Amino acid sequence: MAVTEVPSQRTAVEERRDWWKSAACEGADPELFFPVSAVGPGEADVARAKEICAGCGVRRECLQFALATRQLHGVWGGTTEQERQLRFRDTGRHGETGAARGSRVRSV
Ligand code: SF4
Protein backbone atom coordinates (compact mmCIF):
# COMPACT_ATOMS: atom_id res chain seq x y z
CA MET A 1 0.00 0.00 0.00
CA ALA A 2 1.43 3.35 -1.01
CA VAL A 3 1.83 6.08 1.57
CA THR A 4 0.01 9.23 0.56
CA GLU A 5 1.65 12.46 1.65
CA VAL A 6 -0.56 15.44 2.43
CA PRO A 7 0.35 18.18 -0.12
CA SER A 8 0.81 20.94 2.45
CA GLN A 9 3.13 18.73 4.49
CA ARG A 10 5.16 17.74 1.43
CA THR A 11 5.67 21.41 0.62
CA ALA A 12 6.69 22.22 4.19
CA VAL A 13 9.19 19.34 4.21
CA GLU A 14 10.64 20.42 0.88
CA GLU A 15 10.95 24.03 2.05
CA ARG A 16 12.68 22.88 5.23
CA ARG A 17 15.67 21.77 3.19
CA ASP A 18 16.40 25.44 2.42
CA TRP A 19 15.92 27.18 5.75
CA TRP A 20 17.25 24.35 7.91
CA LYS A 21 20.79 25.14 6.67
CA SER A 22 20.63 28.42 8.63
CA ALA A 23 19.37 26.94 11.88
CA ALA A 24 21.03 28.39 14.98
CA CYS A 25 20.57 25.04 16.72
CA GLU A 26 22.82 23.18 14.31
CA GLY A 27 25.43 21.53 16.48
CA ALA A 28 23.50 22.21 19.70
CA ASP A 29 22.72 19.38 22.08
CA PRO A 30 19.46 17.82 20.77
CA GLU A 31 18.40 17.08 24.35
CA LEU A 32 17.91 20.83 24.87
CA PHE A 33 15.22 20.81 22.19
CA PHE A 34 13.71 17.46 23.11
CA PRO A 35 13.89 17.33 26.91
CA VAL A 36 12.12 14.72 28.99
CA SER A 37 9.57 17.35 30.01
CA ALA A 38 9.03 21.10 29.81
CA VAL A 39 8.86 21.31 33.60
CA GLY A 40 11.02 19.93 36.39
CA PRO A 41 14.47 18.75 35.28
CA GLY A 42 13.78 19.61 31.64
CA GLU A 43 12.80 23.19 32.39
CA ALA A 44 16.39 24.49 32.18
CA ASP A 45 16.87 22.69 28.85
CA VAL A 46 13.75 24.31 27.42
CA ALA A 47 14.89 27.73 28.62
CA ARG A 48 18.30 27.24 26.96
CA ALA A 49 16.67 26.01 23.74
CA LYS A 50 14.43 29.09 23.68
CA GLU A 51 17.49 31.32 24.12
CA ILE A 52 19.06 29.71 21.05
CA CYS A 53 15.81 30.10 19.11
CA ALA A 54 15.59 33.77 20.07
CA GLY A 55 18.75 34.43 18.09
CA CYS A 56 17.83 32.22 15.14
CA GLY A 57 17.32 33.84 11.74
CA VAL A 58 14.87 31.17 10.58
CA ARG A 59 12.67 31.10 13.67
CA ARG A 60 9.52 32.05 11.79
CA GLU A 61 10.06 29.37 9.14
CA CYS A 62 10.78 26.81 11.84
CA LEU A 63 7.59 27.58 13.73
CA GLN A 64 5.54 27.53 10.53
CA PHE A 65 7.02 24.12 9.70
CA ALA A 66 6.21 22.78 13.16
CA LEU A 67 2.62 24.01 12.92
CA ALA A 68 2.13 22.79 9.33
CA THR A 69 3.49 19.33 10.09
CA ARG A 70 1.99 19.15 13.59
CA GLN A 71 5.24 18.48 15.42
CA LEU A 72 4.04 17.16 18.75
CA HIS A 73 7.34 17.05 20.59
CA GLY A 74 10.21 19.40 21.24
CA VAL A 75 11.02 23.08 20.95
CA TRP A 76 10.45 24.49 17.46
CA GLY A 77 10.59 28.14 16.55
CA GLY A 78 10.95 29.10 20.18
CA THR A 79 7.78 27.34 21.27
CA THR A 80 7.18 24.26 23.37
CA GLU A 81 4.78 21.53 22.44
CA GLN A 82 2.27 22.89 24.95
CA GLU A 83 2.42 26.36 23.42
CA ARG A 84 1.88 24.92 19.93
CA GLN A 85 -1.03 22.86 21.20
CA LEU A 86 -2.69 26.10 22.29
CA ARG A 87 -2.30 27.39 18.74
CA PHE A 88 -3.73 24.18 17.28
CA ARG A 89 -6.67 24.44 19.63
CA ASP A 90 -7.25 28.13 18.98
CA THR A 91 -7.10 27.86 15.19
CA GLY A 92 -8.94 24.55 15.03
CA ARG A 93 -12.01 25.59 16.96
CA HIS A 94 -12.47 29.12 15.82
CA GLY A 95 -10.85 29.38 12.40
CA GLU A 96 -8.77 32.36 13.43
CA THR A 97 -5.28 32.69 14.78
CA GLY A 98 -4.51 32.79 18.45
CA ALA A 99 -2.78 36.12 17.94
CA ALA A 100 -5.99 37.56 16.50
CA ARG A 101 -7.79 36.54 19.68
CA GLY A 102 -5.05 37.65 22.07
CA SER A 103 -3.64 34.17 22.63
CA ARG A 104 -1.26 33.52 25.49
CA VAL A 105 1.21 32.14 22.96
CA ARG A 106 3.99 34.59 22.26
CA SER A 107 4.22 35.48 18.57
CA VAL A 108 7.53 35.35 16.72
S1 SF4 B 1 14.02 28.41 15.67
FE1 SF4 B 1 15.07 27.18 17.20
S2 SF4 B 1 14.58 25.04 16.72
FE2 SF4 B 1 14.06 26.27 14.92
S3 SF4 B 1 15.86 26.20 13.61
FE3 SF4 B 1 16.06 28.02 14.87
S4 SF4 B 1 17.24 27.41 16.67
FE4 SF4 B 1 16.51 25.53 15.67
Image (tube, rainbow, N blue to C red):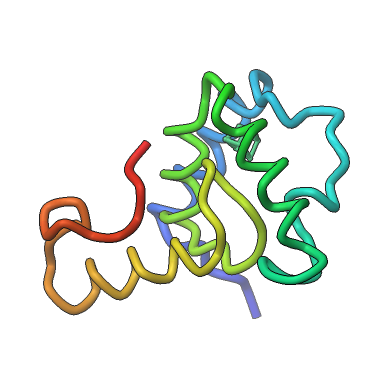
User: Image quarter for residue 41?
Assistant: bottom right
86 relative to 106, above or below: below
> Is 84 placed left or right of 20 in the picture?
left
Taking the spot 43% from the left edge, 70% from the top edge, the residue there is: 85
- Which quadrant of the render holds ligand 1? top right
Q: Residue 25 appears at what percent x and percent y? A: 73, 31
Q: Residue 67 appears at what percent x and percent y? A: 43, 55
Taking the spot 68% from the left edge, 24% from the top edge, the residue there is: 24
Screen quadrant of the C terminus = top left
Taking the spot 58% from the left edge, 68% from the top edge, the residue there is: 72
**Front in this rendered view, residue 81 or 12:** 81
**Front in this rendered view, residue 17 or 83:** 83
**Front in this rendered view, residue 78 or 66:** 78
Q: Residue 19 appears at what percent x and percent y? A: 57, 25
38 relative to 19, above or below: below
27 relative to 72, above or below: above
> Is 81 placed left or right of 25 in the picture?
left
How many numbered circles does the render carry? 0
User: Image quarter for residue 1?
Assistant: bottom right
